[in-house]
Image: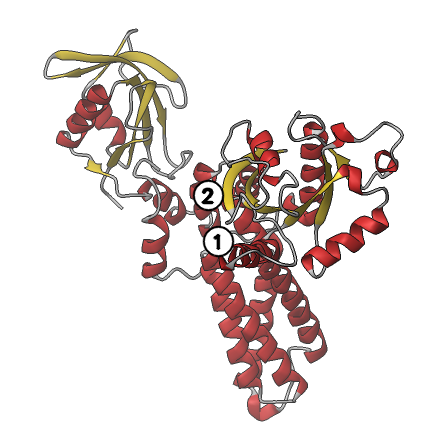
Amino acid sequence: MTDTIVAVATAWAPAAIGVIRLSGPEALSIALRHFRFRRPRTQPRPRYAHHGEIWVENQLLDEVVLIYFPKPHSYTGEDVVEISFHGSPYILRRALETFQAAGARLAQPGEFTLRAYLNRKIALDQAEAVATLIQAQSEAAHRLALSQLRGTYFQKVRQLRQNLIDYLALLELELDFSEEDVEFASRSQLKMLLSELQGEMERLLASYRMGQAIQEGIPLAIVGEPNVGKSTLLNALLGDSRAIVSDIPGTTRDTIQERLFIGGFELRLIDTAGLRENPSDLIEAEGIRRTLKAVQEAFLTLILVEAPRFDNLKTLMAYAKKLLGELPPNYLFIANKSDLVPPHHPIWSVPEVVKISARQGTGLEELQQRIAEKLTALGTSGEALISNYRHYAAFAEALEAVQEALELIEAGRETELVAQAMRRAAYAIGTITGEITPDDILGSIFSRFCIGK
C-alpha cells in the first residue's frame, strides 16, 4: 500500500479531546505542512508528545499535541501520526479536510487494523478482537476480548494446526514415493494428533454459546408462582420500577427482559409469568409456556419462593421439580419475604437458599454475590471461548474434516483421501488465524469496524 490514509479516531461529538490519525508513507510530511512546533524544532522525536499548533490557510485552527510513530514500530506497521485536538466537531472536520487536501485519503472502516494485519503486526483473529474489545460492555466481555487480542485465544490450536501441516507434508512425501510402499508419517501418532485436535475443537465449539452470552448479555430467568415477588425482585435489582407490581396474582403475563450488571457480567434478567398448574385463560397458558422456554435458554434460573412456606432444602427441591417439571442444570433458590419469617424459623439455617426481602431491599448484596459466583463456576472467566460465529463455522468445518480423516485411517483407506481431509481441516483453521485469507472474508471482517480503527 503506497497511499496515506486519515480518519478521526474518536467520536464525532463535543469532547475534551479529539484525535486524528494518519498512516502511510506521507503521514509525517502531510502533518508537518500544517503543524508548527512551539519550541524550535523541524522534526518530531519518535514516540514523544510535541506541543504545537495546526494552521490552515495562514490561520490558527487549534493548539494540539502531535506524536509520531515511525515504521515498523507503530500500530499499522507504517509511519503513523496521531494529533490530539480540542474535541470540537468543527475543528476535527476542518483538520480532516485539510489533511485530505494535502494528499491523504479518508480511511475505510477498519482500514488501520487491516493494514496492521497485512503488515503482520497482528493475526486475523486478533484483528477481529479489536472490534470486540471496542464493543465490550462488561468486565467479562472486556476480559474475553483482551485474551483474544493478546493472541492466547487460539495459541494451542495454532500449534496443533502446524503439527497437522507437518504430518500432511509427510503424507505428501509418501504420495511422491507411492511405488516404494513406504510410510513416512506414523499412523498411530497421526491418530493421536487428530484426536487431540478433535478434542480441542469440540471444547471450543461447546464454548460458543457462553462466548456469545458474555458479549450480548447472559440470560437469567426469574421463575416462581404468581405473586411470589418476581417483578418486585426485578425492580429491586434494577433500582427502578420497570415491571408492574401488584398484589393481584398473574399481573405479569409475558416475559420482561432488562439489562443489569452484576459482578462484572452483563445480564439479561428475564421476569417471567407466574407458574401454576391450572392457568385461568389461554393468555396465561401462553405466558407459562414462554416462562418454561426462558428457563431452557437461561444460563442460570433464579427460583423464587415465599420464605414462610419452606423450612428445608428437600421440600424446596420437590416443590421446584413439580413447578418446572424438572430442575434446570443451573439454578439458585431465593426465599423472598424473609421479613415475614421469625428469627428461629428453620429456613435461616439452609445455606443453599438466599434469603431476601425484595420489597424492603434486604439480602440483595448477598444475592448478587451468589449470582456472580454461580456464573464464574460456569466457566465464564475462561480465556479460550469462541464468541465469533465465523470462527464457530470454521471450527465446525475443520472438526468434520478431522473426524473424516480419523475414520479413513481406521478403515485403512488410501493416503490421498486422508491427506485431502487433513488439507480441508488445515484450510478451515487457517481462515480463522489468517494463514488463509480470501478477500471476501477480509472485506466482511473489516467492514464492521469503525472508520477511525
- Secondary structure under tag 2 reads helix
Crowd around label 1: few <14 · some 14–19 · many ≥20 (10 Å):
some
Q: Which mark is residue 388?
A: 1
Q: Residue at x 16, y 34 (%)?
A: 103
Crowd around label 2: few <14 · some 14–19 · many ≥20 (10 Å):
many
The x, y position of residue 372, in whole percent, is 67, 38
The x, y position of residue 222, in whole percent, is 62, 45
Q: Residue at x 48, y 53 (%)?
A: 388
Place residue 453 in its image quadrant: top left
Q: Residue at x 36, y 30 (%)?
A: 70
Query: What is the three-letter code of the residue carrying label 2?
Result: Thr
Q: Residue at x 76, y 53 (%)?
A: 319
The x, y position of residue 333, in whole percent, is 74, 44
Q: Taking 183 as reference, is 147 left or right?
A: left
- Residue indicated by mark 2: 132
Q: Is residue 139 visible?
A: no
Which color scheme did the rendering employ for the protein?
A: secondary structure
Please report contact status of discs 1 and 2: CB closer than 8 Å, yes or no: yes
Q: Taking 376 as reference, is 388 left or right?
A: left
Count of picture labels: 2
- Residue at the top extreme, as displayed: 39
The mark nearer the N terminus, 1 or 2, is 2
Give the answer, above or below, for where 335 lies relative to 195: above
- Secondary structure under tag 1 reads loop
Residue 345 or residue 5, whichever sits in front: 345
Q: Taking 25 as reference, is 287 left or right?
A: right
